[in-house]
Amino acid sequence: MNPNQSHSPAKSRPHPSRTNTLLVVAALFTLLLTLPKPAAAQTSILNGKAIHMLLVGDPFAVALQKSAAQLEQMAGGTLNIEVVGYDDLYHQILLNAKDLESSYDIISFDSVWAGEFGKSKLLLPLSDLVKASKIVEPSDFLEIAYASAQYQGVQLGLPIQPHPELMWYRTDIFKDAGLQPPVTTDDVLAAAKLLTKPDQKQYGICWNGQKGQALGQQIAHFYAAFGQHLLNEQGQPTLNTPKGIAAASYALALLPYSPPDVLNMAWDQRPQRFGSGGCVMTYEWAARTYLVEDPATSRIAGKIGYVAAPHAPGEKSVTAMGAWHLGIPMNIGARKDIAWKFMEWLTSGATEKFLAIQGNGGMPRYSIMRDATLSKTYPAFSVVEQLGLAGELADWMRPAVPQWPGLADALGQVYHDMLEGKTTPEQAAAQVQKQAESLFK
């Protein structure tokens, strides 16, 4: 329960928005009761065996843990789920790959790791298995999400939680201030300045400022907002450019309107602060809307709008697309068949719809985004579908090359120093360019 949750006076009449929320909850409950249980009759999915999974602590993993008992009954076996943090997952996958036989049947991996893992042959190629499958249905997946699990045309995983980093904003506060939703980075700065009220512990904007991977990813998205690719057509770093410096200057300009601890803020802190009223806007992944849209835990549920990532004036609209995939370690050994059989079932349309009801706000499939009941629970679904159909979702801002982890860390280190006042945007851009060039030699 959110300690800041507000309570209505006992004699007040039910607010229309709360009535609508109750109707949605009731509809979801009814849907859950009537939804055909994924492969419930197919107890041969696991046939009494256990599946060992290594996952990152994102919404899809939360949904899996929450419904583990039901999934075990549906699949006819046992699920052993290990959930770790982002950096820990990456290192654990690399360590597991050194073992003679994998400790895990299925692992989750970020789309940006596909290049490194593909080149190092850490994941089992799935293209032939997908082609022979009658369950996978690649055409139902968001095209960009499905393709982001490939390396040199070979499918290495299946999407479990694809989602873009949108701009979330408080519709009630924007309305009271007479503001329109932000479209450009100038709009963001203007709104953030107007709505920052430190005496009320209200700040205009939250974003990833934590040193390392968190800030590195955020800076990569800011580069995209200013139309700057991190790599040129030859695959070489292009960080020290006028647009790159403008992106760095934008990050610096956000500081006065951000919470005092923004330089320690990462993925988990952004939605928590936003949900408690600590900031009026936040950059955040769409799959995490469940953290603020549940009226039982959020005092701002129903007061949130979602728009495309704001772009610099004069630049094209582009929103960064991320995706978590499920893959099978190359050193899976004799358990290859059972691992694929379970993963094929787990990423099927019926099972992923079930997981959406359990809290996975990712958008793996068009059929899920277009579900009338689920779209009421996840308002961001319609925004993501529109962006996808308009061709405004992209993943080039976080290139899936083997050097990506090192590049993101360099961005997150160098620009953190800039945000602390140790360097200027121009100096930081020159410095990170040199570090990046050493990675790509």
Image (spheres, rainbow, N blue to C red):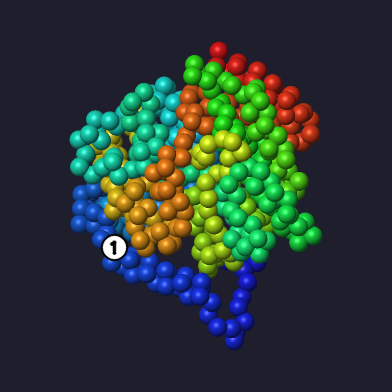
Q: Is residue 122 left or right of residue 278?
A: left
Q: Amino acid at mark 1?
A: Leu
Q: Extreme top residue here?
A: 441
- Say above or below: 369 vs 152: below
Image coordinates for residue 401, horizontal then vertical, percent: 48, 25
Q: For the C terminus, which image quadrant?
A: top right
Q: Is residue 126 left or right of residue 91?
A: left
Which residue is at the front of the view, 196 or 276? Answer: 196
Q: Quadrant of residue 265?
A: top right
Which residue is at the front of the view, 229 or 129? Answer: 229
Q: Extreme bottom residue here?
A: 11
Asked if residue 59 shows in the view, the reply is no
Q: For the N terminus, which image quadrant?
A: bottom right
Q: Is residue 360 left or right of residue 30?
A: right
Which residue is at the front of the view, 256 or 420? Answer: 256
Q: Extreme front residue here?
A: 314
Residue on which the image places disc 1: 35
Asked if residue 312 shows in the view, the reply is yes
- Say above or below: 203 vs 394: below
| x 61%, y 38%: residue | 312
| x 64%, y 57%: residue | 179
- Count every numbered label the image shows and give the total: 1
Image coordinates for residue 176, horizontal then vertical, percent: 66, 64
| x 24%, y 48%: residue | 45
Image coordinates for residue 136, horizontal then vertical, percent: 26, 42
Q: Secondary structure at mark 1?
A: loop
Q: Say few, some or many: other residues with alpha carbon within 10 Å of mark 1 (under 14 / 14 to 19 / 20 or more).
A: some
| x 47%, y 28%: residue | 400
Image coordinates for residue 78, horizontal then vertical, percent: 33, 51
- Say above or below: 306 vs 173: above
